[in-house]
Image (cartoon, helix red, strand yellow):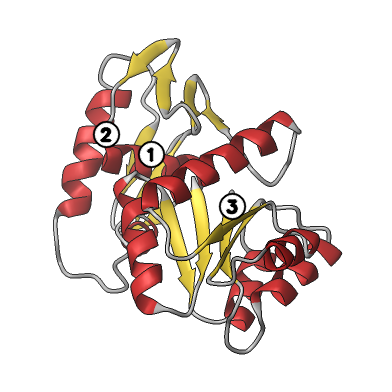
Amino acid sequence: MRILIIEDDKDVASFIQSGLQQSGWNVDHADNGKDGLFLAATESYDALVVDRMLPAVDGLTVIRTLRASGIQTPVLVLSALGEVDDRVAGLKAGGDDYLVKPFAFSELSARLEALLRRSGEHGSTQATTVLNVADLKMDLLRRDVSRAATKIDLQPREFQLLEFLMRHAGQVVTRTMLLEGVWDYHFDPQTNVIDVHISRLRAKIDRDFDVPLLHTVRGVGYKLGGDTN
């Protein structure tokens, strides 16, 4: 699951980002409306968490602009403004739900999951809930992984790593891409964390099957699906 947080309060953004990442979700963050609008319009996200009061471009303008462009990604609006008129304004701008600050992370997480369920029921193309590569299947809502109908148990970070690889199936994924997309590192700390997790993941999704899916592209990175050519 990939979420974009558009929030200028660093403490609030860090609180949300940390909680979602611990739940195994991929999370991007923009600290102003202009950058958030650009990311939401050019990248693929399953849901957006948008603060109302943002620098550069305010949150409701971000949402209106996205909706006017035909982008229907589910949006959870965050705001310290909690009066009925404020909530109505957020929903009329195109928000799908409205959460008043301060809030408990458990409520935010539950609301996001509800948005994603509704979006899947309505057949939204913006929120992909099932990923498939050959006979490997990942259900993002149930957080289930199986191969050839055999259930595979993954740790949260392994699930996050596999989701990233499945979203880039057939492509060579570099170490830098994995560090930034899965571990949120924006530099290479010369760590073997990728090698360790790739090895564990390969053992779970390939070891008991005839056809390997996870390939090492020597000197470059990794590729899920197909072969290394």
Distance Cα–Cα, label 2 vs label 1:
8 Å
Left or right: residue 66 compared with residue 191: right
Residues under numbered marks 2 and 3 in contact, where contact means CB atoms less than 8 Å apart: no
**Which residue is nearer to you in this view: 200 or 11?**
11
Indicate the amino acid at tag 1: Leu
**Which residue is nearer to you in this view: 171 or 72?**
72
Q: Is residue 89 above or below residue 56?
A: above
Q: Is residue 184 above or below residue 157?
A: below
Q: Residue at point 69% right, 62% down?
A: 84
Q: Which residue is mark 3?
A: 47
Sequence-earlier tag: 3 or 1: 3
Dot 2 falls on a residue whose secondary structure is helix
Q: Which residue is mark 1?
A: 162
Dot 1 falls on a residue whose secondary structure is helix
Indicate the amino acid at tag 2: Leu
**Residue 195 point in image, percent of width and height:** 19, 48
Distance Cα–Cα, label 3 vs label 1:
19 Å
Q: Which residue is mark 2?
A: 201
Residues under numbered marks 2 and 1 in contact, where contact means CB atoms less than 8 Å apart: yes
Q: Residue at point 61% right, 80% down?
A: 33
Q: Nearer the viewer, mark 3 or mark 1?
A: 3
**Residue 164 point in image, percent of width and height:** 43, 47
